[in-house]
Image (tube, grey):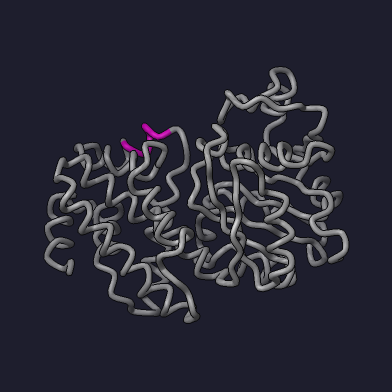
Amino acid sequence: MDNVFPGKIAVMGGGSWATALAKLLLDNNKEEKIMWYMRRDDRIADFLRTGHNPAYLSDVRFDTSRIEFFSDINEVCSKADTLLLAMPSPYMKEHLKKISVDLSDKYVITAIKGIVPDENVVITEYMRDFYKVKPENILVVSGACHAEEVALERMSYLTVGSENEELSHRFGERLNGPKMKTVVSRDVTGIEYGAVLKNVYAIASGILHGMKIGDNFQAMLVSNAIKEMARFLNKVNPCERNICDSVYLGDLLVTCYSKFSRNHNFGSMVGRGLSVKSAMMEMEMVVEGYYGTKCIYEINKTYGVYMPILEGMYEILYNRVSPAAAIRKIAAQLV
């Protein structure tokens, strides 16, 4: 199928990141159409009626004549050559378990910044093991990018990762435009785990902001976070990588500091004194870092990497340890 890649692309998911990626694909390829899977028929009907996603990035207008919508996941999977997964990781397994069509000859691009719940595996591994997608047909897309800034057409960079460099370059060309540039990488597993960890550290950064601890300690925490990420990535997927590349350090920085970071904003509410449950209820979008914290914590039981920031976040989010006590413990371990 290499000669048709990416062929007919189906965007899988109805959230902000799915919407931003759909805008990129359509804006950069004026003559092409896309397929778009959304679970709810009422959302599709509202989208067709108004010309924009009714729930996310609603200021972004679309030419709906260039979009074929589906609420039947098997129908869209059977028609598409390439599936672009952009749904929240906590709900991914629930969506995909409905698939009965054979995916083994499909291309899969994952833009999901999380881990499959209960399985504690990254998305590419899950697609390979459970749906028999060929490793050379799998790509990952990661930051440093916020969906909101992509939608606002601000200058952004994305990293496309695959063991198949030709596919990475070809899909990167589909995303490239006046305001979007892409780079390619072979570090698929590192990119996926890095995307999970930066959300965990963004929660920690937000907690410090909410507690009004100050910029000095914030800088210390973030600089230690990238070292903690490097230790973990080097253990789970040893390879030659530059942890200062945008897909690692850049994504960490933008997620820790941006006003668009839902993980930072969630952490800030916890730092101001809201309970974890109350802060989750206040958020209108999925807080990937909350789920990622537990997944990485469980995975690290196998690897035993020194991760005091991750462990502190786990204590706050799952063991009801006070942020003040957890941050004191983290502070004593930073170098």
Give whichever of 287, 41 is nearer the camera: 287
Give whichever of 280, 319 is nearer the camera: 280
- Residue visible at 37% across and 71% down? 230
Above or below — where is 239 with respect to 173? below
Give whichever of 231, 249 is nearer the camera: 249
Where does the image place residue 19, in percent across and percent down from the top left? Answer: 62, 37
- Residue visible at 13% across and 50% down? 324
Above or below — where is 154 with respect to 61? below
**Magenta-span inclusion, residue 275:** no
Residue at the far front: name it: 178
Q: Quadrant of residue 71?
A: top right
Residue at the far top: name it: 49
Above or below — where is 225 with respect to 301? above
- Residue visible at 40% across and 40% down? 262
Where does the image place residue 248, in percent across and percent down from the top left? Answer: 44, 62
Res. 260 visible in picture: yes
Give whichever of 106, 96 is nearer the camera: 106
**Residue range corresponding to the magenta coloring:** 279-283
Where does the image place residue 313, in percent across and percent down from the top left? Answer: 28, 56
Q: Is residue 142 left or right of residue 204?
A: right
Give the main secondary structure, helix, strand or loop, of the magenta stretch: helix
**Magenta-span inclusion, residue 282:** yes
